[in-house]
Amino acid sequence: METILIVDDEKNYLVILEALLAPEGYEIITEDNSINALRLIREADLDLVITDMKMPGMDGMVLLDEVKKIDPELPVIIMTAYGTIEMAVEAMKKRAYDYITKPFRNEELKLSIKKALELHRLKKENRLLSQALSDRYKYGNIIGKSAPMIKIFEMIGKVAQSRASIMITGSSGTGKELIAKAIHYNSPRKNRPFISINCGALTETLLESELFGHERGAFTGAVTMKKGRFELADEGTLFLDEVGDMPPSLQVKLLRVLQEMEFERVGGTKTIKVDVRILTASNRKLKEDIESGIFREDLFYRLNVVQIEVPPLKDRIEDIPLLVAHFIEKFQPAKKKKIELAPEVWKALYSYHWPGNIRELENTIERALVMSSDETIILGDLPDYLVKKEEEKIDLDKIVPRNLTLAEALEQIEGKLIVRALKSTNNVQSRAAEMLGISRHVMHYKMKKYGMLT
């Protein structure tokens, strides 16, 4: 839904214009004060501004100048009852989209608005496409020749052309978002927006506002209307990263949106319809979360029409040379001499288990290039933990009594880890959860399970 801001100190014109344009499917915001209108332009997601010329405080021409400073591509239509040829010429020089005199003809105004919005939309599409081409989110950006990666390439080719919801699973750092972008940019929606959000990085209130948007005054700090990620992704793709960390209350709302493809902004009553393809990613074992009551089963099957499992780096070590070459080129593209790795460095890279996956390998290569003093990376350029050392012997009997079953032993260890994390964070549950690599609501569930909550 496209949003139009109308600015006029004559309130009767605001009423007339809103009554004329709202039935056309536009979202109309009106403001009779040009100073307040400028604040809205800075803060709200707008597609068009229609402003009167003669207003107290700041006239339409000054407002036009300010709009172009904030967003040069935002179209502005100027209206006036005191029009002259000189004014019209000046307005067009200042890059107003159109100049209309009052009283206006309804169809003339509607046509001008339609063309202005079409131009704005085209500019946004071109900008998105240019960004996509510069980032080169194609198969070539996913590095790999191993059997697991060839299988993923084949799956991308099959699912990209469909509308099906795709769930991408795998450990952190395996490149799940890169695969989501490859699906989008090889799909019929490639010229429309790719919008992403990390569901585990925001509080429940902020996440709801980011997903569905909010109306002005919906909560403290909501000084203007804001479109959510679903609206911004209309006709494109929305990527929900770490969807397993979404709070249960929002899971219910997300399920309804997926079923109906409509929603209301936070604090709003107007139903907004969208056409969005959903891609999700998670590093969690969601089927276990379903059994624990943490994740909704019906939502899981709605999101998991097709699943792409991204292998950890330790299961595709034959891809390490390709990845290393890619990262060397990325961090030192202007290097005249070829960077070599000493044989013992290759041995260390192949022997390490890479818990941080490709992201950890990327950081390792970047660090090695910084530390290296010549064209050969040696063992000393790698982090200490990467160099294989003799494993410390662990006395298991001191940690776990012999008379426990496997399930009992795992629960005891899990409980001790949670207690240790809470102690080290002064009982701040959110920080303890982050330390353990789990979400806040999983932390709460575990503490309740082990009787740590009263």
Image: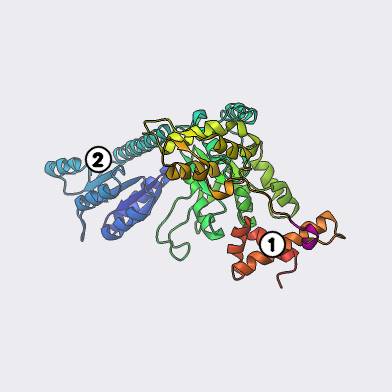
Quarter occupied by residue 124: top left
Left/right of residue 63 with respect to residue 212 in the rendered view: left
> Which residue is labeled 2 in the image?
98
Where 199 falls versus 305 (above or below)? Answer: below
Q: Which residues are magenta?
A: 394-399
For marks 1 and 2 on the same chain, the one whose residue lies earlier in the sequence: 2
In the picture, the disc for residue 240 is: none
Q: Is residue 395 magenta?
A: yes
| Label 1 with label 2: CB-CB less than 8 Å | no
Residue at the location (27% across, 44% down)? Answer: 77
Residue 244 is situated, as x and y percent measured from the top left of the image, at 63, 50
**Callout 2, which amino acid?**
Asp
**Callout 1, which amino acid?**
Leu
Inter-mark Cα distance, 1 to 2? 65 Å
Residue at the far bottom: name it: 454
Closer to the camera in the image, 211 or 86: 211
> Which residue is labeled 1 in the image?
417
Where 332 falls versus 428 (above or below)? Answer: above
Quadrant containing the N terminus is top left
